[in-house]
Amino acid sequence: MFPKIRIKELKPLNLEEGYLIDGFPSAGFSSAIATESMVHTSNFQLGGIIDSDAFPPISIIKNGKPNYPSRIFVNEDLKVSIFLSYLTLDQSLHRVAAKTMLKWAQKHKIKLIVSSIAVKTTEGGETMIGIGSTESAREKVRNAGLKVLEHGTVPGIPGMLLNEASITGQEVIVLIFQTDGNGPDFRSSAQLCMAMSQLIPGTSCDIPSLQQEAEKAEVVIKEADEGSKNLRDSMYR
C-alpha cells in the first residue's frame, strides 16, 4: 500500500489563479530556509497542516507552542501559499508528496507552482537555472532573467511535479541552485528567495534579516532532522 499524505485546512482559502511554493528541503536546507524567510517577510498566516502516518512523529516547539513539522502558510491578499516543512522526506514519499501537492493546487485553481532543487558544489557558483513544465512556464523563467535548463535530470519531489504537470498542463517551475550542503547556507537561501520573488508578484525577501532567520531556521530544521532520523530509519526498514 502507498502511504497517504493528509492535508487539513484550518480555514477557508481563496487562492484561485494564485501560487504555491514547495518548501520541502532537498540537499541542504536552503529551500526550507528561503520559504521560512518569505513567510516572515510577507505576512503569511497558518492555513493548514500536512501530515501522514509515514511521517516521523515529532513536534516542533516554537515560542513555547507545539507545531506540526509540515504546514501550509497563506497570504490571501497576494494569493500565495507555501508548503513549509522541516522534514526531509524519505525517497519513498516523493511521488505521493508531489501528487498530493498537485491535487491540492488543482482544488484551489492554483496558476503556478514553484519548487526548487539543490545541486551540491564546492565551487560557490552563482548561477540559478529554471525549468518549466509547459512552454508558458518556461517563458516565465526567461522573463525572470533566468537561464532555462536544456539537458539534465531533476530528482525527487521537483522532478515528479514536472513530470505530472507536463501531462496535465499545470504550470510548474523548478529553480535549480548551487549549495555546498553545509552550515546555514545564507547565500543560496538568499538567491533562491530572490528568484522566487521574481516569479511571484508581491512577495519579497528581507535580505538583512534573512541571515538571522537562516541561522534560526537552520537550528530548528537540523533538530527536527536529527530528532526524526532514528525514527525514519526504523520506520522504513
Image (spheres, rainbow, N blue to C red):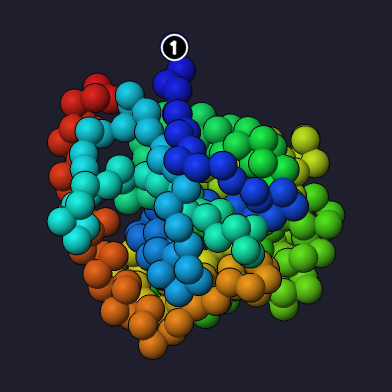
| Residue 208 in the figure: left or right of residue 38 | left
Depth order, front residue of 198/231: 198
Seen in the picture, residue 157 relative to 192 is either above or below; the reply is above
| Place of residue 85 in the rendered image (x, y in percent of width and height, measured from the top left) | 38, 49
Type of residue at label 1?
Met
Q: Which residue is mark 1?
A: 1
Q: Nearer the viewer, residue 130 or 140?
A: 140
Which residue is farthest front? 11
The crowding category of the residue bearing disc 1, from other C-alpha atoms within 10 Å (few below 14, some 14 to 19, many at least 20), is few
User: Residue 199 location, x and y as percent?
Assistant: 67, 68
Residue in view at x 72 percent, y 43 percent: 109
Position of residue 31 relative to residue 2, above or below, is below
The answer to whether residue 186 is above or below residue 108 is: below
Q: Quadrant of the C terminus?
A: top left
Q: Foreground residue, 83 or 172? A: 83
Pick the residue in front: 148 or 223: 223
Q: Above or below — where is 82 with respect to 69?
A: below
Quarter of the image with the N terminus is top left
Query: From the viewer's perspective, is 129 left or right of 62?
Result: right
- View extreme (top): residue: 1
Is residue 217 among the parts visible in the rendering? yes
Which residue corresponds to the image point at 60% horizontal and 37% vertical from the top-left?
104
Regarding residue 160, the answer to whether it shows in the image is no
